[in-house]
Structure formats: structure tokens, C-alpha cells
Image (cartoon, grey):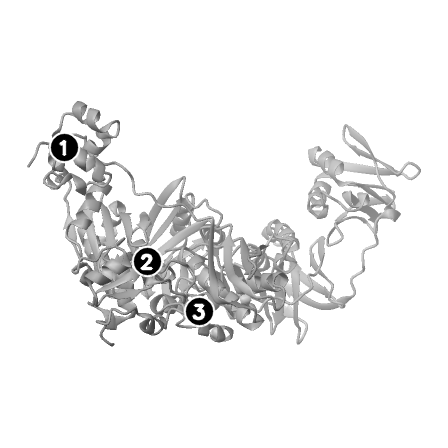
């Protein structure tokens, strides 16, 4: 044990979790292409946001690498050409943010089951304050295990969990034993936990600061914690005191729940400009359904619907329509979005980009007894939401949108990619 | 016109009648009360053209006649008088009434009764006799669910159906719905009718029924005009007439849950108290109170970002599946306040389907609430 922590401990310590999904983008791809599981795989390479279009591999970099790829020395930010040199059997998939976002939403929904205090750090990382959840769900560590299990079971993803009393400690703890890590730092042991770790482990200490600290022969957080404050300030400037506090395990920063977003939207750019009214209408419906699903997932309702159209000459139009407060049902929103579309679109003029959004978001939606004449409809929307969460947005469509499903490019990514694979030659067939 | 009558009786009758006077009258004369002295009685009438309230009280008529007087100043004057005989005398040339009661004398300028709008005389169609107290309760229990939003006029009304000696009243604002049934002691054979009464008119009628019923007043009867545009409720001394709302009422029977995934039974007063306390923290637009079933109890909770949160438990018997649902606290409190039985039942089918509230042991009343969708 090192010396006692410098700060005064709060009378009742907080119970925080940091949960970090392991190799998230790559795991998402393994999850929908199970045949690739365990093979060296990266996502990256694609520069543009136009789905279905692939940039030349030579220019791209690795966005994320699976653990199998990491074993070959492939890591994120590595140029793809170099990655393929290190691992000729490497499978390169384009980045599909829409898909990762969807998977991420499912994971965050699991977090929200145990506490509303969830602070997202990115698609694959969040802090949770479970101080008040323990009475219902058990000790913090038990909650951590529950969540890790639920993420594996329901989403097929690995996660690493850090349990502790401060954000700094939980974040370091979750990174310690990746993948599938689980590290608990009990209250009172924060300083002891941090002491042996290298200074680079502390978030906020970058390569430059680390170099300076090592120049002062401060290699561990324990040394940093006990170093005379004055000389530390001389070397590092005004930020020194904060770093030292955190190195001692003191970090009162709260888990901050992001406010209600101002708007939500979904848009797509077409591989080829689209002038067919039938197809465009189906896409308006599908995009609206997707936006409505995200609204419902967050328990929000909207006061206005927006439609965005970009023609092939880049003329961009955004139109807005107020909607009555209440239930953001698929059919109601789609009706409004379609009306906007009919008012906006010049018949036959090719469309490059189409988007549907909602604005004026409110936290709760009072459902109506007679909305669309069917009180069972919210339950139907909820069931469709569940199916889409589980199997993706293309899994199920309301009758009229089936035709639009042919535009769903996510499904056949792999098939399309195969022939485009550049000459590594070592790529075995599937 | 010259007559004398009891100041107190007149004040009470005038108070009831002037509730039909609109504070923003479309015609200036509608701010006045029509007063007629004839046939051994003084007849009072006030209207906003949709709602009309009439009253007559015994008087000694020395010379018949009529006049309209401003409702506001007349009410304020007579309400302030001590009881005693009040004498009326109209000076027809100046259309001014001299009112004398003991030491008090007032002169109030009126408008010629001939200028008061002619109200349609109700040509009797069907007629139903009702028990006043039961009807007052039924009114109270349904009017609470009606909307006050004139933007959806149909929802400001109460659907009233008479069929096979049963009267059914239904009100909804689109988010909650109340249904009350009562037996009709006396109907003309084969009466089968349905109409939409403005909730406002029923609320006024309810006000009249309460004290009347206490005095063992005679029965209430409901008279529907032949052309179906108006309805009149008659009770001793009073007549309340209203224009009916026109339109097709939503198919309410479809939204009343018929299945029961979860049935919760608890003490009405306790439920009301708990909901009231928890609702103090439900301050967002949707006023959300969350209800969760646990073995042997309910947990009610509410939170508002800047205010804080509030959780309470309540013993309850729970059958069926576990439940987590959110309601607008207002809708819940409205119904719990007016239930008279000791126990209440909440029947739900998941967190997104309508919930049903009913008094245990009283099949005549049902109240349906559509939940609020939140992240539960």
C-alpha cells in the first residue's frame, strides 16, 4: 500500500462503471459475417461516404482491426497498404457507420436498463453511474457482470468493464485486461490500484507529457501522486495539480447525461442519381421508419418533420412541417414526410441525396387512444422496432416499402467486395 | 310589470341561471337576464345561444310584464341583500326597474325584452326520466375525461346513449376515456337514441342537481328535441337546454381493453395519495408518473431534470405479468379522485397499450388511459 490518498473521501462513495466494447467496428463485421470470425479483419479504406463505392485501397488507412489482425501487428491508423504487407491474408471491409451506430444503439439500450445516468464517450464506450441502481440490481460489480453478459448474449459482442468510484479509475480499469476484461477497484483502494501503473495509463497524459515526466524520472502514477507539487507545476504548468489529484485516485467529475438532442435525421446518397418517384417514395417511408424508431428508442416525440432533397446539380432543398404533439408512430410521420416530398420534389428530376429528420424533440410521448384508429398500433411499432434492432433495418418492412429493400446495400457488401479485392493473392476463398 | 317575491329565492335562482351568461357575449343583450312576470311566477332566462338555463319561482304578480337586466350588477345586488320581500316595478318609458327590499332601493336600467333573441321552442321528441343523484355522479365521472380544447369540438362533448333501459355516457379527450352506465327507471317504450352533449352543459346541470337532490327534489327528466339539435333537462324549477354537438363519435368500445396481462388491485385512497405525492415531481410537459409492479406492491416514481425525483411504494395485489408503464399523472389523479369504492383495479396489457381503471365491485364505470411512451 502506498500512502493515504490526498483527497477527502465523500461520505458515501459513488459506484461507476466504464464499459468499452472490444474491437467494436471489426466485431460488428464479424457479427454479421460469422464466417469471418477469428480471421484477421480490418475496416477502413473507404474515403467517401457514398455506399457501394470503394476508394482505392492504396490510399486508405485502418479504422479498426480485429484481435486476429492485431496479432499480425495491424492496428488502427495504419495505412492499408502497410497493413496488407504485414498480413497478406487480411480481410478489408469498408466502414459502415450506419450499421455500427445501429449496433451501438442496442448496446446503449442495455445500459439504460440499469441506470438513466449513461454518458456516451463514443459509439463503443460509456460511463455509467450505478450508485442508485445497487438497491435494485445488486453491487456495482454484479451489475457490471450482468451488463457484460447481456451485451455478449443479446448483441454477440465482447466488452471490457471497469468498476470503481471515479471516472479515471474505471476507465483505466476497463482497459487493463482487454478483451473481455473485468477489473474492479473497491472503494479506498484507488491510489493503490493506480500506483504501479505507468504514467501513460492516465487519460490526459499524452506522449509529450509522459516524456517530460519520464525525464523527471516519474515513471509510475504512484511516483506522480507523491511528487512535490511545486516542482511538478514548474515542469508541467497549471494542469499539474489536476493530474496529480487524479493519479491519487481523486476525480469528482460526474457522469454526465447528454441533453435531449435538438433533432434526429437519416439521409442517404444514391450510388446513381434517382429519378423514379416510386423508388424515392419508398425510400422516404423507409428513412422515416428509421427516424421514428430512433425517436421511440429514446422515448422522444417530435414537433416537426423535415425533408431534405439534393438534386444532381447539388441544389439542396430542406422543407419543414409541424406535427401535432404525441406519438411518433411510423405511419403518421411517414404521411407527413411524404406530403413534404410531394410538395418539394420536381417530378422526374434526379435526386442525389434524400433525408428525413425530426425537430423540436420532447422527452415523452403521450399516446393517443384513437391515433390511426388502432390502439394496438404502438405495440406493432414496438414489435417492428425489436425485429429491426435484432436483424437490421432491412429485416422487416411495412407492405409498401418492400420494393425499396432492393436499395439496401448492407447485405451484399461482402459479395460485392470479393472481386474487388486487390492482388494479395493469398486470400483464400470462402 | 309589478311584482314581489323572496329576495333569497330570487338570488339563488339568478345565481344558477347566470352561469349560462358568457363573459364574452357575442350580442350585448346576452349579458342580460330575461325576466318575465306572469302566471303567478317570475321566470328567469339566460343564454349564450348554445347553453340556456331557465328558472321560475313563485311571486305575487300585480301587473305582468318583462324586461332584461344586466346579469352582473343584478346578481351582485341581490346576493348582498338580507332575506325579505323584494318589490319590483318597471318604468316602461325608461326601461328602468326599481328594486326595493327593506331599507334598500336600486334603479337598474335594462333593455326591452322584445330585443332578446327568440329561442327555438323545443318540440318534444323522446323523453327519459332519470334519477338525479345517480345522473349527477355519472356526469361527474365522465365529464372529467372530456377535452376543453375547442380545436376538437367533438371531444368537448359527452356521448349519451339510451338503449334498453340503460343510459351510457362516454367522454374522451383522445388520451383517456370514461364510460359510465346507469339504469333508466322510466323510458318511453323502445327508446333508443344517441347524442353528444357539451360537457360544459352537463357540468352546469351537475351543479344544480347536487343541492337539489339533497333536498329530495323530484326526478330529473331529459327531453330530446325532435330534430335532434337540442336537448333539455328538466328538474324542479329549472330547465337546462343545450345545443348538441354534431359529428361521428369515435368508436370507443374498440379501445376498452378486453384482455388482462396484468391486474393490479389496491386501496383507492392510498393510490390517490401516493400518486399525488409522486406527481409533485412530474413537471415536464407530459407530466409523467411511472408505475412498476413488484411482488406485493407498486412502485410509483417521477422525475424532472432540474427538480429531482421521487419514488414511493404502495401495497397491492398483482396478478399476471410484471408491469412497467407510464401515465400522465393528471389523468390518473382525475379518476382516483372521483371513485367512491374502497378498492380500485388497474388492468394493463403491456406498457404501450391502453390501461383500464375500474372501481372494484362496481361494473358500471370504466376509465381507460393511454400510456406515455418513455424509456422505462
Return the chain for callout 2.
A
Looking at the image, which residue sits at the far top? A230
In the visual, does A338 lie left or right of A49? right
Is B6 situated above or below A422?
Answer: above
Which residue is at 40% across, 39% downward? B307
Query: In this view of the protein, can residue A13 be seen by the observer?
Result: no
Q: Quadrant of the N terminus of chain A?
A: top left
Is B76 situated above or below A349?
Answer: above
The dot on residue A380 is 3
In the visual, does B198 lie left or right of B31? left
Q: Quadrant of the C terminus of chain A?
A: bottom left
Gap in angstroms between the C-alphas marked 1 and 3? 64 Å
- Asked if badges 2 and 3 are on one and the same chain, I answer yes
Query: In this view of the protein, can residue A339 be seen by the observer?
Result: yes
Gap in angstroms between the C-alphas marked 2 and 3? 43 Å
Residue A72 image position (x, y, % from top left): 17, 60
Q: Residues within 10 Å of mark 2 (few under 14, many from 20)?
A: some
Residue A210 image position (x, y, % from top left): 18, 37
Amino acid at each position: 500500500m502506498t500512502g493515504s490518498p490526498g483527497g477527502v473521501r465523500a461520505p458515501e462513495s459513488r459506484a461507476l462503471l466504464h464499459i468499452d466494447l472490444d474491437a467494436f467496428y471489426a466485431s460488428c463485421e464479424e457479427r454479421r459475417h460469422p464466417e469471418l470470425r477469428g480471421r484477421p479483419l480490418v475496416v477502413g479504406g473507404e474515403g467517401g461516404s457514398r455506399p457501394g463505392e470503394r476508394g482505392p485501397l492504396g490510399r486508405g488507412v485502418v479504422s479498426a482491426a480485429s484481435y486476429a489482425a492485431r496479432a499480425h501487428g495491424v492496428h488502427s491508423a495504419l495505412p492499408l497498404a502497410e497493413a496488407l504487407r504485414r498480413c497478406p491474408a487480411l480481410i478489408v471491409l469498408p466502414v459502415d457507420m450506419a450499421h455500427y451506430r445501429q449496433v451501438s444503439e442496442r448496446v446503449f439500450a442495455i445500459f439504460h436498463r440499469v441506470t438513466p445516468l449513461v454518458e456516451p464517450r463514443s459509439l463503443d464506450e460509456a460511463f455509467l453511474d450505478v450508485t442508485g441502481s445497487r438497491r435494485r440490481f445488486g453491487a456495482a460489480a454484479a451489475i457490471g457482470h450482468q451488463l457484460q453478459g447481456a451485451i455478449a448474449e443479446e448483441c454477440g459482442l465482447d466488452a471490457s468493464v471497469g468498476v470503481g468510484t471515479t471516472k479515471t479509475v474505471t476507465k483505466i480499469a476497463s482497459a487493463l485486461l482487454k478483451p473481455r476484461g473485468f477489473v474492479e477497484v473497491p472503494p479506498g483502494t484507488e491510489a493503490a490500484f493506480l500506483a504501479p501503473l505507468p504514467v501513460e495509463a492516465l487519460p490526459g497524459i499524452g506522449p509529450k507529457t509522459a516524456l517530460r515526466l519520464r525525464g523527471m524520472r516519474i515513471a509510475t502514477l504512484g511516483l506522480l501522486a507523491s511528487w512535490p507539487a511545486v516542482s511538478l507545476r514548474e515542469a508541467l504548468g497549471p494542469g499539474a495539480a489536476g493530474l496529480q489529484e487524479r493519479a491519487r485516485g481523486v476525480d469528482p467529475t460526474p457522469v454526465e447525461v447528454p441533453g435531449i438532442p435538438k433533432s434526429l435525421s437519416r439521409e442517404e446518397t444514391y450510388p446513381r442519381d434517382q429519378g423514379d418517384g416510386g423508388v424515392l417514395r419508398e425510400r422516404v417511408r423507409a428513412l422515416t421508419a428509421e427516424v421514428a424508431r430512433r425517436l421511440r428508442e429514446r422515448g422522444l416525440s417530435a414537433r416537426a418533420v423535415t425533408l431534405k432533397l439534393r438534386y444532381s446539380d447539388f441544389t439542396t432543398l430542406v422543407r419543414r412541417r409541424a406535427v401535432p404533439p404525441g406519438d411518433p408512430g411510423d405511419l403518421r410521420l411517414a404521411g407527413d414526410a411524404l406530403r413534404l416530398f410531394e410538395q418539394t420534389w420536381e417530378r422526374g428530376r434526379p435526386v442525389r441525396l434524400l433525408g428525413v429528420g425530426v425537430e423540436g424533440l420532447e422527452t415523452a410521448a403521450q399516446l393517443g387512444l384513437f391515433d390511426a384508429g388502432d390502439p394496438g398500433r404502438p405495440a406493432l411499432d414496438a414489435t417492428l422496432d425489436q425485429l429491426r434492432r435484432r436483424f437490421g433495418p432491412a429485416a422487416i418492412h411495412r407492405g409498401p416499402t418492400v420494393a425499396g429493400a432492393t436499395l439496401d446495400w448492407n447485405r451484399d457488401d461482402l459479395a460485392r467486395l470479393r472481386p474487388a479485392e486487390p492482388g494479395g493473392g493469398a486470400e483464400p476463398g470462402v | 310589470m309589478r311584482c314581489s317575491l323572496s329576495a333569497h329565492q330570487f338570488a339563488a335562482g339568478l345565481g344558477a341561471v347566470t352561469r349560462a351568461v358568457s363573459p364574452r357575449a357575442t350580442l350585448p343583450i346576452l349579458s342580460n337576464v330575461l325576466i318575465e312576470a306572469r302566471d303567478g311566477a317570475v321566470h328567469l332566462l339566460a343564454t349564450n345561444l348554445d347553453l340556456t338555463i331557465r328558472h321560475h319561482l313563485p311571486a305575487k304578480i300585480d301587473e305582468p310584464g318583462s324586461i332584461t337586466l344586466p346579469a352582473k350588477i343584478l346578481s351582485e345586488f341581490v346576493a348582498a341583500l338580507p332575506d325579505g320581500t323584494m318589490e319590483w316595478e318597471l318604468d316602461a318609458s325608461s326601461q328602468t326597474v326599481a328594486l326595493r327590499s327593506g331599507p334598500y332601493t336600486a334603479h337598474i336600467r335594462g333593455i326591452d325584452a322584445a330585443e332578446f333573441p327568440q329561442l327555438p321552442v323545443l318540440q318534444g321528441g323522446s323523453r327519459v326520466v332519470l334519477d338525479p343523484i345517480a345522473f349527477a355522479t355519472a356526469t361527474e365521472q365522465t365529464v372529467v375525461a372530456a377535452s376543453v380544447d375547442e380545436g376538437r369540438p367533438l371531444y368537448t362533448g359527452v356521448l349519451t346513449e339510451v338503449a334498453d333501459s340503460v343510459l351510457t355516457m362516454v367522454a374522451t379527450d383522445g388520451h383517456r376515456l370514461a364510460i359510465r352506465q346507469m339504469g333508466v327507471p322510466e323510458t318511453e317504450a323502445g327508446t333508443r337514441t344517441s347524442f353528444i352533449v357539451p360537457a360544459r352543459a352537463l357540468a352546469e346541470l351537475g351543479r344544480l342537481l347536487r343541492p337539489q337532490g339533497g333536498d329530495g327534489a323530484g326526478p330529473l327528466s331529459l327531453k330530446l328535441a325532435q330534430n335532434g339539435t337540442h336537448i333539455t333537462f328538466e328538474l324542479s324549477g329549472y330547465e337546462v337546454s343545450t345545443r348538441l354537438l354534431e359529428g361521428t363519435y369515435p368508436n370507443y368500445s374498440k379501445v376498452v381493453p378486453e384482455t388482462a396481462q396484468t391486474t393490479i388491485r389496491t386501496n383507492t385512497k392510498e393510490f390517490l395519495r401516493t400518486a399525488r405525492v409522486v406527481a409533485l415531481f412530474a413537471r415536464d410537459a407530459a407530466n409523467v408518473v411511472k408505475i412498476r409492479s413488484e411482488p406485493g406492491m407498486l412502485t410509483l416514481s417521477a422525475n424532472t431534470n432540474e427538480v429531482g425525483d421521487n419514488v414511493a411504494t404502495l401495497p397491492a395485489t398483482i396478478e399476471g405479468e410484471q408491469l412497467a408503464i407510464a401515465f400522465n399523472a393528471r389523468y390518473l389523479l382525475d379518476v382516483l379522485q372521483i371513485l367512491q369504492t374502497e378498492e380500485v383495479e388497474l388492468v394493463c396489457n403491456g406498457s404501450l397499450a391502453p390501461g383500464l381503471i375500474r372501481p372494484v365491485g362496481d361494473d358500471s364505470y370504466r376509465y381507460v388511459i393511454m400510456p406515455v411512451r418513455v424509456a422505462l
